[in-house]
Image (cartoon, helix red, strand yellow):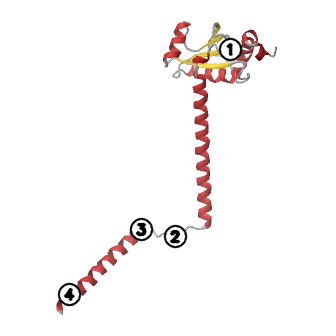
Amino acid sequence: MKRSKRKANAGKAGSRAKQTDQSVQNANQPARRKMSRRDFLGNSAIYSLGIAGLAGGGWYFGNTMMVEAKEADLSKLGNGIPTVVQIHDPSCPTCNALRCEAREAANRFDEGDLQFLIANLTQTDGRALANRHNVGKITLLFFDGKGEKQTSLVGMETADNLEPIFARHVARFGSKKALGS
C-alpha cells in the first residue's frame, strides 16, 4: 500500500511542477486581448494601403521593363518606320537625361510615325552600332524607314527642342501612310 501512495504523491508533485512552469511561462508572455473591431478595421486599412503600394510598384516596374526591352530591340531598324536611336551609356548622367528628353519627344508622335530605340553601349549590339557609325555616347542617330543612317545629333537637347527635329525627320522619311498622303 505504501508503494501506491508514493506513486500517487509523486504524480501530484509532478503535476504541481508542471503547473508552476506553465504559470511562469504565462507570466513572461504579454496578455493577449481579443482584437476589437476598431483594431481590425485600422489594420485592414494599413494592409490595404500596403497591398495597393506593392501592386502599383509592380505595375510601374513591369511597365518600365517592357518599355526598355522594346526600345532595346535594334532589329527594328529598317522596318519601314523612321527611327531615332540614342547611343546610350547607362552609367552616364547626361545619357540618362537625354534618354528621358528624347523619349518624351518621341512619345508625342504616333507609334507608326516614329520609333525611338536605345543602343546600349554595355551591350554587344549597341556597341557594334556605335562603332559602325563611328559615334560615341550622348548621340542621336536618325535612320530612314529602310534602316539607312541619314544624320546624327550630338549633345544634350530638351524634348521641346527635339520635337521639331523629329517632326522634320518624319516629314522627310516617313511612309506615305504615316504622313496621311
Residue 62 is left or right of residue 21, and the answer is right
Q: Are marks 2 and 3 in contact (CB under 8 Å)?
A: no
Quarter-of-image position of residue 56: top right
- Under mark 3, the amino acid is Gln
Query: On the image, numbered disc 1 is attached to which residue?
Result: 80
Q: Are marks 1 and 3 in contact (CB under 8 Å)?
A: no
Q: Which of marks 1 and 2 is nearer the N terminus?
A: 2
- How far apart in space, not on screen, are marks 1 and 2 (Cα)? 70 Å
Q: Earlier in the sequence, mark 4 or mark 2?
A: 4
Quick one: quadrant of the C terminus?
A: top right
Of tags 1 and 4, which is closer to the observer? 1
- Please report the residue visible at 70 percent of the width from the left and 21 percent of the height from the top: 105
Marking on residue 4: none
Query: On the image, numbered disc 2 is attached to which residue?
Result: 33
Of residues 101 and 122, which is closer to you in this image? Answer: 122
Query: On the image, numbered disc 4 is attached to which residue?
Result: 6
Residue 82 is left or right of residue 87, and the answer is right
- How far apart in space, not on screen, are marks 1 and 4 (Cα)? 100 Å
How crowded is the residue under tag 4: few (<14 C-alpha within 10 Å), some, or many (20+)? few
- How far apart in space, not on screen, are marks 1 and 3 (Cα)? 72 Å
Q: Is mark 1 on a helix, strand or loop?
A: loop
- Under mark 2, the amino acid is Arg
